[in-house]
Structures are given as structure tokens and as C-alpha cells.
Image (cartoon, rainbow, N blue to C red):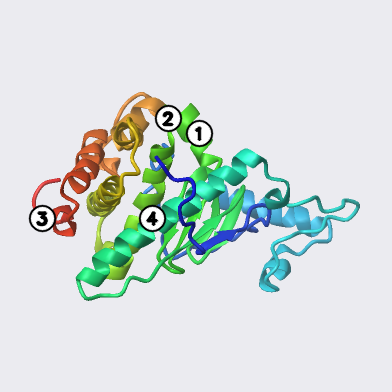
Amino acid sequence: MEWKGRRQSSNVEDQRGAGGGPSLGRGNGGFRIPMGGGRRAGGGMSIGTIIFLVVIYFIFKAMGIDLLQVMGEGGGQVSVPGFEQTESASQRSSPQEEERKAFMATVLAETEDTWNGIFQTAGERYEEPKMVLFSGSVQSACGFASAASGPFYCPGDRKLYLDMSFFDELANKFDASGDFAQAYVVAHEVGHHVQNLTGVLPRFNQQRQRMSEVEANQMSIRVELQADCYAGIWGKYTEQKGLLERGDLEEALNAATQIGDDTLQKRTQGYVVPESFNHGTSEQRRRWFKRGFDTGRVDACDTFKGDV
């Protein structure tokens, strides 16, 4: 992707090295890139995770550190007696990390241009989301999240959350390398923001309270595939600007393939459980991204009618 020298978004919050602090509460539901754990979109933490966090809390308590007090005061840094705080990750980041940050800010700016134009054509105003870069863990309006959760969008604060080390895992673990594969991830989460603005996410979060797990999973698939289609629309506008290079589209389609529910389950457990799918199969994710890319039209991305 030809991105250097283009506008970078000012809607980037760099919280790398700040730390998120543990939270025992359940958030408002985030929408994330799956990492192969089979977790339902927006679901709460497992019992094991909660127990682990409780243990961590009491360990720090025994050291004279009240994490709840620290969090209540709006802090994020914990000073351990006998140790000096080290330089933050954002201060000591490598040139490669800073270039990746610049790329993320450029991609976000391109999504802003795309969706501002689409909303303006429809007579609406697009509210640009913030993108939070973090390292290790982060606290959002949707609760606590670690880097292992993957990138996610939080409807509660209308922010995208991204630990950039995810892209190393995307390339090394999921065989999905390339800058346009990374751009697809950002565009997908921005797609969730568009859904939040248009009422799709609020309706889904309200309706799934009355759904069974299987029903909620089926609806979640439609939500995720629409976000893929919206990412494809952004890809189409990017192509029209002449920013795509040879192989870029294939990188995005490969990334969509590698994070399909069936492919992830085969990789992590050796078999698939279709009723547990919540993001869509590899074929579905490729197809809906390509549909958005081929048409460039929002009305072509209605995943809530008919089969997906």
C-alpha cells in the first residue's frame, strides 16, 4: 500500500506502556478480531481469568499496593516498593514500531476520508472514532482486555483498541503478512464503529440478552461479516485513489481467510464446532470483504437479509 507522505489521523491515543490495571467487572461488550479461543463476541471473562485476577489483587495487596484505589484515582502506573519505574514503551519504541504507528495513523485517516464522504453523501455526519494503541493490557469502557484478546472496538467509548504486536502474531502464527492485511484489521474495527453509529450494534446488544448462545452466535456472524464488507468498501475507495500495490488485495483476502472460525478451530483444536462460530467461516469472510470491495456500496453489505 502506498501510504508514506499521506495524512495521519489525529485521533490516535498512544497508551503503550501505560498499563490497564485489572478489572473484575463485566464491560458493555467489545467486538474483536478472533484469536482462536472460540470466545463469543462481547462475552465476559472466564472463571479462570477472574480467579487469576483476584489472586493478583491479593498479591499486590500483600505488597502494600491497593490496585482498586490506584484505579479509582485514575492511575495506570503501579509503583512497586524497591523498584524504579522504567521508561514507557512509547518512549523506548523502536524505529520499526514508530513506522508501524505512522502506518496505523495513516490507515485510520484514510478510513476517515472514506466514511466522512459516504455519510456526507447520505446527508449524515460521521463521528470519527479514536484508536488507542496499547501494550500488554488496557482498560476500556467495555472492561479490561489483554493483548491476547486481539484488536477490538468498544461501543461504550467509541474507540478502537490495538496492541500492534498482534500484527507479528498475524504474520507468524496465522500466515497473514503484509501491510494491507494489517490495514484490513483496522478497517474491520472501523466497520464496527460505523455499525455503532447506524444502530446495528445497539440493536444487537439489546436483542442478544433474550437470545440463546447459539442464536447470539448466529447474529454475531452477521454483524462481523457486515464489518468485513465495510472494510472491503474502504479497500475499494483506497484502490480508486491509486494507493493499492500489486498483491495488496490478496493480502487482505488471505487475512480474512486465516481468521475464519473454521480455520482457527482447525488450527487450535483440530476440529470444528459450527454452532460455536461467531465471526463466520473463512469462505464467508473472504466473500463479504470482496463484495464490499467489488461494489463499494453500503447497501450491498446487508448481511441481515437471507443467507450469509
Quadrant (top left/top right/bottom left/bottom right) for the C terminus:
top left
Instruction: Tell whether label 4 touches label 2 (CB within 8 Å).
Output: no
* N-terminal label among 2 and 1: 1
Residue shown at the point (73%, 46%) measured from the top left: 92
Q: Is residue 226 left or right of residue 265?
A: left
Q: Which mark is residue 110?
A: 4
Find disc 3 in the rendering and name its residue: 305
Q: CA distance from mark 3 to mark 2?
A: 31 Å
Upstream in sequence: badge 3 or badge 2:
2
The answer to whether mark 2 and mark 1 are in CB contact below 8 A is yes
Compared to residue 217, the image places residue 160 above or below, namely: below
Q: CA distance from mark 2 to mark 4?
A: 26 Å
Amino acid of disc 1: Glu
Q: Position of residue 38 (x, y in %)?
A: 38, 41
The reply to whether residue 41 is visible in this rendering is no
Q: Earlier in the sequence, mark 1 or mark 3?
A: 1
How far across and how far down the image is residue 176, in percent? 40, 31
Q: Choose mark 1 or mark 3, whichever is in front.
A: 1
Q: Amino acid at mark 2?
A: Phe
- Earlier in the chain: of badge 2 and badge 4, it is 4
Q: Residues within 10 Å of mark 1 (few under 14, many from 20)?
A: some
The circle drawn on residue 174 is: 2
Residue position for label 1: 169
Q: Nearer the viewer, mark 4 or mark 1?
A: 4
Q: CA distance from mark 4 to mark 1?
A: 24 Å
Per the image, label 1 sits on a secondary structure element best described as helix
